[in-house]
Image (tube, grey):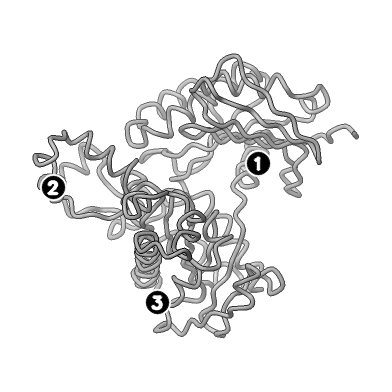
Amino acid sequence: MSEAPEGRVLALNCGSSSVKLALLDPRTGERSLTALAERVGSDSATVTVRRGGFASVSSPDDSSHRGVVEHLVDDLRDAERDSLVGVGHRVVHGGPDFRESVVVDDLIVRRIAAVSELAPLQVPGNLAGIEAARSALGHLPSVAVFDTAFHATLPPIAYRYAVPASWYEQHGVRRYGFHGISHRYVSARAAELMGVPLSDLRLVTLHLGNGCSGAAIKGGISVDTTMGLTPLEGLVMGTRSGDIDAGALGYVGPRLGLELSELVDELNRNSGLLGLSELSNDMRTLTDAARDGSAAAGLAIDVFCYRAAKAVGSLSVALGGLDAVVLTGGIGEHSADVRAGILAHLGGFGLEIDPVANAEHGASTGGRISRSEHPIALVVPTDEELVIARDTETLASG
């Protein structure tokens, strides 16, 4: 195999129980290596590394986030190490201060740690990956790329909650939004596919995976989004409830004998598609079950689609109109049934699905899955790692 060319970035995404890694060219997006660690933190953790058509599977001696990242770094070949210009890290929450990507130092680490309670399932893993990379590859700059940064442009009418002002002024209770790296990428890519300057477009982007969010993007700027202070608010997700009447917690807590923290945990881990169906959080499993006659699975899918369509309507208010709906993420890119279910509710906008194009995920139509001329619906595969790599290269060279 040929040696890895110079000017590569190592993009790291440390989730709550997984670690994704890619070695890629920030100019072309070409990957020379990808890796996925699953069941991180457990005795059954595994690491799969792929180079071209070859894959290897191993078990790390230390299954913690830090141990897994060190295991992956140790697996790099000399040519791959020599090609690196920096390490980029996805960081889920940047709080109110981080409005753009930054080179990491000790102060930055402390500032990220200070907001970790706003995303307790994700940020500790993000930090563990940063610390491991700085320890193993300390001669290279590490760059933090924040999911919340893209939404730092939200106006007060979008980010303020109607709660006592002191909650915001003293404790930072406001809408931050998430999946910003994905929303940023697919909005720019949609403009390219449409052949229209991003500055002229009003887009609603729907990132639909195990976590889901929508964003209103006007002229390339995020002006509203569905996730809030934490990644729990907004659309129905795999295990997260999305929007719910806060009064329900006070009502059901005493009846179930649960404390507030336990109720929030239920909303994060046992709700959403899983809670509605009592079967699975995986849309593929639910789609198969619904076809086999499961009413609960069918209801979960219908609620998911309806709530996503409602979000398109509300986000269009922030845009003053709508030029395109962009669908991305694992479900948005791969589930023709879900896309059809969402667009079925949006006929009032003039959106009409093209069943043939939708069935092939827009592969032969430049992503377009609608018959309507305006607005249109597009499937755009996301590439968060490419955004991370490009920000990292820019800051590492700057």
Count of numbered circles in the view: 3
Badge number at residue 345? 3
Q: Amino acid at mark 3?
A: His
Asked which quadrant contains residue 303, the reply is bottom left
Which residue is the site of mark 1?
A: 389
Q: Amino acid at mark 1?
A: Ala
Asked which quadrant contains residue 26, the reply is top right
Q: Where does residue 196 sit, x and y in percent of width and height?
A: 62, 73
Nearer-N-terminus badge (1/3) = 3
Q: Where does residue 2 sit, x and y in percent of width and height?
A: 90, 34
User: Is residue 106 placed above or below 143 in the rendered structure?
Assistant: above
Residue lying at the far right in this picture: please name it.
2
Q: Could you tell whether 219 is left or right of 387 in the image?
A: left
Q: Residues within 10 Å of mark 2 (few under 14, many from 20)?
A: few
At numbered mark 2, what does the secondary structure look like: helix, strand or loop? loop
User: Is residue 124 placed above or below 236 in the rendered structure?
Assistant: above
For marks 3 and 2, give the one nearer the viewer: 3
Q: Where does residue 363 sit, x and y in percent of width and height?
A: 69, 68
Q: Residues within 10 Å of mark 1 (few under 14, many from 20)?
A: many
